[in-house]
Amino acid sequence: MLPKIAELKFKTNEQKEMDMRGRSFLFDFEKGEFVLRNGNTVLADEIESIQIWIEKVLLTEKYKYNIYKRDDGKEYGVMLQDLIIGTNYPRAFVEAEIRREIKNELTKHPRILSISNFSIDKRNPELYVSFKVNLVSGNNFDKKMII
């Protein structure tokens, strides 16, 4: 009689990638602090962690802070400040550039397939954006933000 051989499980590339990214914890951007339950930080699920990453990217102006500078040219954040504040460009041009910048930066995430259904409303000095995030997994979610 032969011994029973255990089933081996191998990590897929997606699982390896998630392991490399580490864990993400829920963050309340309005309060500016991590979400706590019973005194402990709360682990974010896949979609929550992507939403947190999106907020961080869209709230970080690219090239403004040296901490995000990288030697490989893959800086973190977006370049929206010049488009939002004090611009004399036509509104259609500004909105097209905002869409382009957001799509380009967010689709760098390996789990984001595309960004669609954009809505932009500029109310000085704030920019209200909403869009649909389409994930590689087939899931999607709507995201609304004030930048």
Image: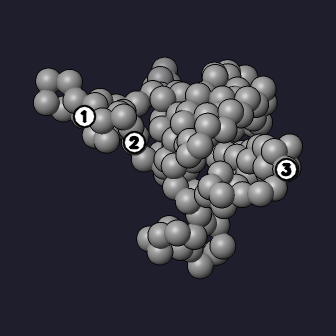
Mark 3 vs mark 2, CA separation in Å: 42 Å
| Amino acid bearing label 3 | Pro
| Amino acid bearing label 1 | Thr
Q: Answer yes or no: do the residues labelled 3 and 2 have beta carbons within 8 Å?
A: no
When asked about the image quadrant of residue 39, the answer is: top left
Which residue is pictured at 56% across the width and 59% down the height? 61
Which residue is pictured at 76% across the width and 31% down the height? 118
Residue 104 lies, in percent from the top left, at 75, 51
Q: Secondary structure at mark 2?
A: loop
In the picture, the quarter occupied by the C terminus is top right
* Residue 29 falls left or right of residue 56: left
Which residue is pictured at 22% across the width and 29% down the height? 36
Q: Answer yes or no: do the residues labelled 3 and 1 have beta carbons within 8 Å?
A: no
* Residue 74 falls left or right of residue 16: right
Mark 3 vs mark 1, CA separation in Å: 45 Å
Mark 1 vs mark 2, CA separation in Å: 11 Å
Of the pair 16 and 94, the residue shown nearer to us: 94
Colouring:
one colour
| Residue 37 position (above or below residue 57) | above
| Amino acid bearing label 2 | Arg
Name the residue beneath numbered marker 3.
Answer: 90
Of the pair 75 and 146, the residue shown nearer to us: 146
Name the residue beneath numbered marker 2.
Answer: 23
In this rendering, the label closer to the viewer, 3 or 2: 3
Of the pair 62 and 1, the residue shown nearer to us: 62
For the question of whether residue 136 can be seen, the reply is: no
Residue 93 lies, in percent from the top left, at 85, 49
Of the pair 109 and 131, the residue shown nearer to us: 131
Name the residue beneath numbered marker 1.
Answer: 41
Q: Answer yes or no: do the residues labelled 1 and 2 have beta carbons within 8 Å?
A: no
When asked about the image quadrant of residue 137, the answer is: top right
